[in-house]
Image (tube, rainbow, N blue to C red):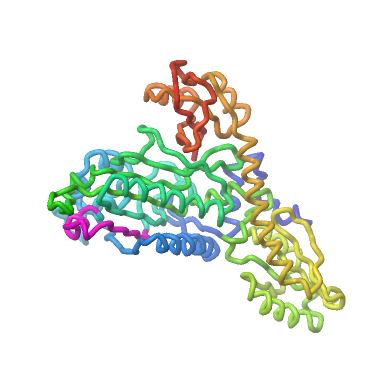
Amino acid sequence: MAKEFVKDVTAMDDDFAQWYTDVVTKADLIDYSSVRGSMIIRPYGYALWDNIKNELDRRIKETGHENVYMPLFIPESLLQKEKDHVEGFAPEVAWVTHGGSEKLAERLVVRPTSEVLFCEHYSNIIHSYRDLPKLYNQWANVVRWEKTTRPFLRTLEFLWQEGHTAHATDEDAMEETIKMLNVYAAICEEILAIPVVKGQKTEKEKFAGAKATFTIESLMHDGKALQSGTSHHFGTGFAEAFNIQYTDKEGKLQYVHQTSWGFTTRIIGALIMVHGDDRGLVIPPKAAPTQVMIVPIAQHKEGVLDFAYDLKKSLGQVARVEIDASDKKPGWKFNEYEMKGIPVRLEVGPKDIENKQVVLVRRDTLEKVFVPLDQLETKLVELLDEIQTNLYNKALAHREERTTVAVTLDELKQSLEAKPGFIKAMWCGDLACEEKIKEDTTATSRCMPFEQEQVSDKCVCCGKTADKMVYWAKAY
């Protein structure tokens, strides 16, 4: 029966890219727009983003940050102020050349990111050490003109938050950078049940204009990595370009030390690829727009619908509950909500009412549990917690199983072919070695993890002495 309803979804292990495309459209997360590489985020997809956004926003405010909003357009001259930054973004920039029918005197950029806008503003409002720190965040859309696109993972326009802060000292800025990286890691692990590796990007992979970039990396079902959030320590580079100075306690002029950090709708792509299966989405309860879907059985029979609505009302105290009282067949409903990844399905019919029980079906294992009505609220809360933990543990086990060690370049190549995933290998720090690994294998350095291990004493590429352990992987 089930196969009949999910036959339009390609099996993950047959064609993972097609499976992903099938799931994002059939689970009603997105629709394609008439502009190539742009997507319409449908209500179910946006509800999922809302849950992530609201939880992250709460944590951002808890750490003392205020929300602001910067303009969508950036004058070309402003973008040019920080050389590395503009060079890094030039290939992805969308330009506005006309306003109505008039050609603009100066081209405008549709923001790919807002560093220069925050910097210009900070140069106007920061004067004294008393003005620091400035802890600002904005929720916005950005535009990056990507050549190849895929819903959530890489689109011309995406939603995100970008934090931009200014501090009196390098130490304060560094503390902020790591603090916000840890907030991102907590969202991924506690809310989305996605285990992450925290670490620093190499010089080659760091953000354009940053002193150092830190990242959280997660591993997808197909063994590819996904950069799931980044936090950048800018040092004084932008402050010097934009003349953001403050008078310290001794009356001397100093440059501020800045940070920037961002978390995007791309994380929904990670959630799909980490937890999904051949039936569609699997959404962790803490992130799920609907945690429990009630499906009445034989709802035309007297008392069934009333009973189901009473359940919705009482269970609404402990979970996010919906009911499908449409005239579609129960089999269709079962498959629809499995496709949408709803954590728990509650079935109730005349016999269940008679026996004072309901049936709970968990999405992660498809296991059925019969629960007496007088224990329902308690059992449901326990079950949702259990599903959340199980999804995290399952993803962690998958990551561990797909993490290997390579001592030579040949081993690294073989690992990538035989078992795609994270590969731990030593690196001498030379850019030439990093580029050769990418050229020979298409794998990139994902991060130098905070938790370092000495898996060898030689660089995986050149064989010279090496003391940095790096995670390598093919990536989205």
Residue 225, horizontal then vertical, whole percent: 52, 39
Up-down: is 198 above or below 6?
A: above
Q: Residue at x 31, y 64 (%)?
A: 68
Residue 326, horizontal then vertical, whole percent: 69, 74
Residue 132 inside the magenta-drawn segment: yes
Q: Nearer the viewer, residue 129 or 402?
A: 129
Residue 36 in sight from this viewpoint:
no
Residue 116 in sight from this viewpoint:
yes
Q: Nearer the viewer, residue 140 or 357?
A: 357
Q: Residue at x 63, y 76 (%)?
A: 317
Q: Residue at x 66, y 46 (%)?
A: 394
Residue 131 inside the magenta-drawn segment: yes
Residue 84, horizontal then vertical, whole percent: 26, 38
Rendered-image quadrant of the N terminus:
bottom right
Q: Nearer the viewer, residue 48 or 60?
A: 60
Give the extent of the magenta segment. Answer: 119-140
Q: Is residue 104 left or right of residue 142?
A: left
Q: Nearer the viewer, residue 238 or 245?
A: 245
Q: Is residue 419 left or right of residue 63?
A: right
Return the residue found at the far front: 250
Q: Residue at x 12, y 53 (%)?
A: 251
Residue 328, horizontal then vertical, whole percent: 72, 70
